[in-house]
């Protein structure tokens, strides 16, 4: 396993506009889709890496991973049938810095990836970014009527530590329900 490290303030500043590589392959059970990488994740080169992000604890609580993974082990998710990508590939301090045009373009690029790799499920982590990128203003959490290619669409709560509406036990239930 890669050594866990924390970026310096300078490294975080330099991460603006960096891109985080997708972890994706054909035939996944679920492709997890964030809005865009945060500076911390872009700086260290791993998905959902910021301390306080509840993605990895929710994955474990939802029994998608057999133990709590470190963000530095994100590549192991492929062996469990999961992949990782974002609607918009560039890093930013906050997701609200993204323009509508970036979200729409990101939705088109993501749709092409989904058609190419054909995951069973596309799992959006955050309802607001899904609603905005795909212009689905009435979307609710859970399984959607719409599909991307042949892939089901699921929308789960954003696991960011800033989303106080859902704590890890509730997030774990959403993740487990989707994974069945």
Image (spheres, rainbow, N blue to C red):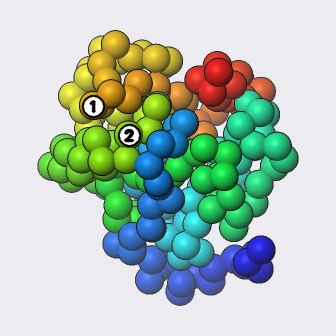
Left or right, 60 with respect to 139, comes to right
- The N terminus is located in which quarter? bottom right
Instruction: Say if 101 sits above or below 121 in the image.
Output: below
User: Are the residues flagged by discs 2 and 1 in contact, CB closer than 8 Å?
Assistant: yes
Check residue 163 in the rendering and tell me which mark sits there, or answer none: none
Q: Which residue occupies the foreground of this view, 110 or 100?
A: 110
Q: Is residue 110 left or right of residue 33?
A: left
**The C terminus appears in which quarter of the rendering?**
top right
Q: Position of residue 53 (x, y in %)?
A: 65, 50
Q: Residues within 10 Å of mark 1 (few under 14, many from 20)?
A: some
Q: Secondary structure at mark 1?
A: loop
Judging by the rendered image, the residue that carries numbered circle 2 is: 118
Label 2 – label 1 distance at C-alpha: 8 Å
Indicate which disc, 2 or 1, sits on the residue closer to the N terminus. 2
Please give the residue where the numbered disc 1 appears in the rendered image. 149
Q: Residue 25 location, x and y as percent?
A: 47, 54
Residue positioned 81% across, 49% down in the render:
68
């Amino acid at each position: 396993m890669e050594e866990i490290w924390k970026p310096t303030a300078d490294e975080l500043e330099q991460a603006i506009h960096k891109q985080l590589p997708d972890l994706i392959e054909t035939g996944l059970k679920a492709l997890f889709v964030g809005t865009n990488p945060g500076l911390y994740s872009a700086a260290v080169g791993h998905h959902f890496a910021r301390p306080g992000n509840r993605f990895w604890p929710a994955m474990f609580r939802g029994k998608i991973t057999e133990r709590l993974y470190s963000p530095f082990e994100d590549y192991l998710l492929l062996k469990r049938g999961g992949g990782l990508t974002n609607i918009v590939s560039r890093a930013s301090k906050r997701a609200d810095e993204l323009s509508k045009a970036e979200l729409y373009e990101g939705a088109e690029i993501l749709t092409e990836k989904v058609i190419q790799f054909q995951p069973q499920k596309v799992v959006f982590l955050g309802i607001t970014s899904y609603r905005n990128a795909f212009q689905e203003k009435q979307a609710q959490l859970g399984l959607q009527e719409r599909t991307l290619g042949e892939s089901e669409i699921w929308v789960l709560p954003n696991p960011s530590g800033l989303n106080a509406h859902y704590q890890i036990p509730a997030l774990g239930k959403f993740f487990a329900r989707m994974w069945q």
